[in-house]
Image: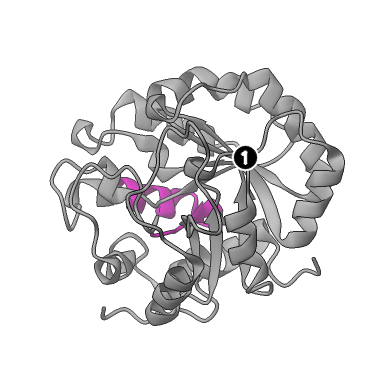
Amino acid sequence: MTLTLPSWACNAHCHVFGPRSRFPYAPGATFVPQEDAPKEALYALNDSLGLTRCVVVQSSCHGFDNSATEDAVTSRPSDYRGIALLPTDVHDAELQRLHAAGFRGVRFNFMGHLGRHTPIEDVLALAARIAPLGWHLQIHGDPALLTDLAPALRRSPTPVVIDHIGRIDAALGLNQPDFQALLMLMADERFWVKVSGMDRITRLGPPYADAQAFARTLVAEFGNRVLWGNDWPHPNHGGPIPDEWQLVDLIAEIAPSQAVREALLMHNPQRLYQFGDNQ
């Protein structure tokens, strides 16, 4: 790794799995990891990379039991935040409890391999309930579904974060309809996007030259609403597992100036995840 990260740089997308002896995987989970990825391994990786802050996203392998994510966040309460998986009829008391524990949003999966999709109107009804907490929706979906959901998502009363560059296909180029649809969404200032997952949308493999153009475009056009994360430990990954140090170095390719990197890694996460605010 050759890139020096700004102070308070944030890894805004990663996960913890288990350990299963303490945090069992959900019965019937659509994805169960072969190996645990506990908080200690995440802390060690982030510390070695110079990533002071972190957002731990609840994994489908643990279902609606957010205990493993909560444990990782509450063990570093000043610098770590959580994104929950929740049923849309979750009680308000549980939302308040999770907020106090450091959670700042709820994720919904609209990927075919992650099981049944939550009706979008139910998602928006929950969004109205989390809005007073300053939370946001995080949406993970294949590009066709995102395009279909766009009119509904524009009615969200909370910010909406789109995961992994919208899971577009990098081989189809910048002018492809799916990427153009993502750019149209981003024109609405309620929308944010994560430029994590270049390794998921590439057709060329590392260093993901075909995918870099999409991330670079998003950073250049919407620099105040873009986030970066390494997606460790890369669940359900179809290609070679990325080199974590290379992923950090590639930040310089998509965010070429120090000011742009500070927005991507420090200022944007500070605003969205409320780092520094009292829990």
Horizontal arrangement in the rendering, residue 246 relative to residue 10 (left or right): left
Q: Is residue 216 magenta?
A: yes
On the image, which quarter does residue 114 sit in? top left
Q: Residue at x 52, y 49 (%)?
A: 24
Looking at the image, which is closer to me, 219 or 208?
208
Q: Residue at x 73, y 34 (%)?
A: 127
**On the rendered image, what quadrant is the C terminus found in?**
bottom right
In the picture as drawn, the residue positioned furthest to the front comes out as: 21
**On the rendered image, what quadrant is the N terminus found in?**
bottom left
In magenta, the rendered stretch is 214-230
Visible residue check, residue 189? no
Q: Residue at x 34, y 56 (%)?
A: 35
Looking at the image, which is closer to me, 95 or 178?
95
Instruction: Give the structural element (helix, strand or loop) at label 1.
Output: loop
Horizontal arrangement in the rendering, residue 172 relative to residue 188 (left or right): left
Write down the residue under mark 1. Answer: 64
Are there few (<14), some (14-19), or many (20+) residues within 10 Å of tag 1? some
Horizontal arrangement in the rendering, residue 213 relative to residue 120 (left or right): left
Q: Position of residue 87 (x, y in %)?
A: 68, 31
Q: Is residue 155 above or below residue 243?
A: above
Q: Position of residue 140 (x, y in %)?
A: 48, 36
Q: Position of residue 101 (x, y in %)?
A: 74, 61
Q: Position of residue 112 (x, y in %)?
A: 40, 24
| Main SS class of the magenta portion in the image | helix
Q: Residue at x 63, y 27 (%)?
A: 154
